[in-house]
Image (cartoon, rainbow, N blue to C red):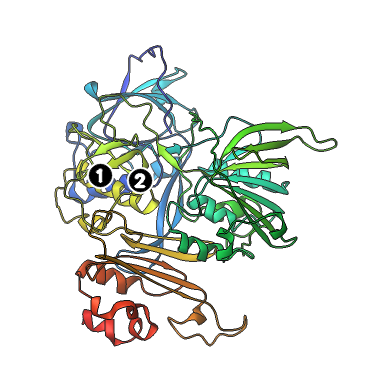
Amino acid sequence: TPAAPAEQPWPLLSMSHSFDYVIVGAGVAGVSCLYELLYQIDHRGLRGCGDAVATVALISSSDVAQGVRTVQQHSKRVAELALASHDLTSLAAAHANLTTLQGEVLRLTPESRSLLYKPAGGANRLPSAGEQEVATVRYRQGLCLCCGAVPSRPLPPSPHVAVVRDTASIQDLAARLSQAARVVMVGNGGIALELAHALTSVQELIWVVKDSHIGHAFFDEDAADFLASQLPDCGPAAHAQKGPGDLRVARAWSLCAAKNHGPDTLGQTPYGSASGPAWLSLLQKAHGGEPSGALSPPPHITLEILTQISRLEQEHRPGRAPGAIVTLGNGKCYKDIDIVICATGVEPATHWLPASLPRADDGGLIVEHTMRCQGCTDIYGAGDCCTAVWPQQARQWFQMRLWTQARDMGVLAAQRMSGLEDELAMGFAFELFTHCTRFCGLKVVLLGLYNAQRLDGEPQGDVISYTRETRPQHGPGDDNHTPGSAENGPTYVKIVLLRGRLQGALLIGETNLEETFENLILDGIDVSHLGASILEPEHINGLDLEDYFD
């Protein structure tokens, strides 16, 4: 993440370095933009200064670029992604017209098409920068800002806090977990949901969330209850008010609620590129395990809802390393804490950019449907740092800062920046919201308006949702499974209909329904006559729905 600009002007070097295109940020959006841009330059023979092949510079705060690769294509628009890391030096060696630079961007001056860049040293610094502190990097044709995001609610600085954001922070967390028994985790997004099911070596986890149920950013309470049931002894009852007597010694799940919240704080700690999909494999590898090894939750989990951390103090522990004392906004105090994991949401890392680039209410750079920053002709944005403000936005698509959208935005930005104006080139990627991930060990697919987003203004009774939940009926060693049945493991299906037409779907587990529901949403077929029976296995797996797509 680029650093905030210094209060005093930095001395400019007499020599500047110019490229046709510059990309700031080497996360999923930046790397996707880079590969598409290099493809467009090669495929279309794009030329730059002096009629030479167009040149590209990629500026990264770390020595590793984080891209993605497709692990499994579940339907035309639903893909399961995995992390694909690239060493900056090797990346540049593979492309003659690419220069990779490791360091920080301190300032952007749109009027002169220039960036003030502070090299980090090593093989990826500009040779002519020598030992000077800063260099000027200029772009002749286009700049794409893929500077990502930072944790939105970081904790006060403390040696006990581990922020999960990039590869370096994951390696740091893995090292700390090897000696940790009692851990506090703050956050309620995707990373927190995955961690809760993966802290195998931890004996006790205190999970602090500011919302009324887990996974609030993704799910309603019913879906959250289903996911909670995949953690030990934590079915729907986990969302009832529990007292101390409900705690179990082994495999326990407890829940505590509070009415008052702790204060919010905001730091400016710089981070590298986001860890990307399948980041848990990085944690396992850094922790000395096999990436494909089995994950399991801690033996004891305490969920503190509707509260936040209000105070963090160091605790002296005789004969042991110092620990932490964590005080919550509800007045509860937890002692003998080894690590406090910060797995909060993110906010756009745009604090360092000039005020002339318009921001949305969430702080993101406002980008048009061409991925151009609003009011600019040669500056583009992609990924977590930008906010899509598109008047002609598709009904079943909305922005959510996820790796799938970062990839699609990066590709579209490269196409537009290179002059490709084909409206169909990436239009399908923004026709329907899709995301595939894994929470609590289960595959999760989100399609369209899966949680009735953007349907609040519709007349009462026009919006209907149906849900179906299945549980395994077989023993652990029984392999005689029927496709689409409960024998495939626990599943949860929720669909949202507007006046009889499917608008969204939430699929948890191995449902094999991605393609069917994707087609129903896009085709806009009226299925109101099926009612709730649309979720019955004989309709889903039989000819009833398949007839629609003959």
* Residue in front for this viewpoint, 457 or 399: 457
Q: Earlier in the sequence, mark 2 or mark 1?
A: 2
Figure check: 349 above or below 78: above
Label 1 SS:
helix
Q: Cβ–Cβ below 8 Å for labels 2 and 1?
A: yes
Distance in Å between CA atoms under marks 2 and 1:
9 Å
Figure check: 447 above or below 480: above
Q: Residue furthest right?
A: 319
What amino acid does circle 2 point to? Ala
Tell me if I can see residue 55 in this picture: no
Figure check: 70 above or below 308: below
Q: Quadrant of residue 541?
A: bottom left
* Picture coordinates of residue 269, whole percent (x, y): 51, 30
Q: Quadrant of residue 496?
A: bottom left
* Picture coordinates of residue 451, whole percent (x, y): 36, 59
Tell me if I can see residue 547 in this picture: yes
Q: Quadrant of the C terminus?
A: bottom left
Find disc 2 in the rendering and name its residue: 29
What amino acid does circle 1 point to? Ala
* Picture coordinates of residue 42, whole percent (x, y): 24, 48
Which residue is found at the position 20% from the left and 70% from the top?
Answer: 523
Which residue is found at the position 29% from the left and 52% from the top?
Answer: 398
Find disc 1 in the rendering and name its residue: 413
In-image side of 48 versus 116 (left or right):
left
In-image side of 24 versus 185 (left or right):
left
Figure check: 430 above or below 92: below
Q: Quadrant of residue 389?
A: top left
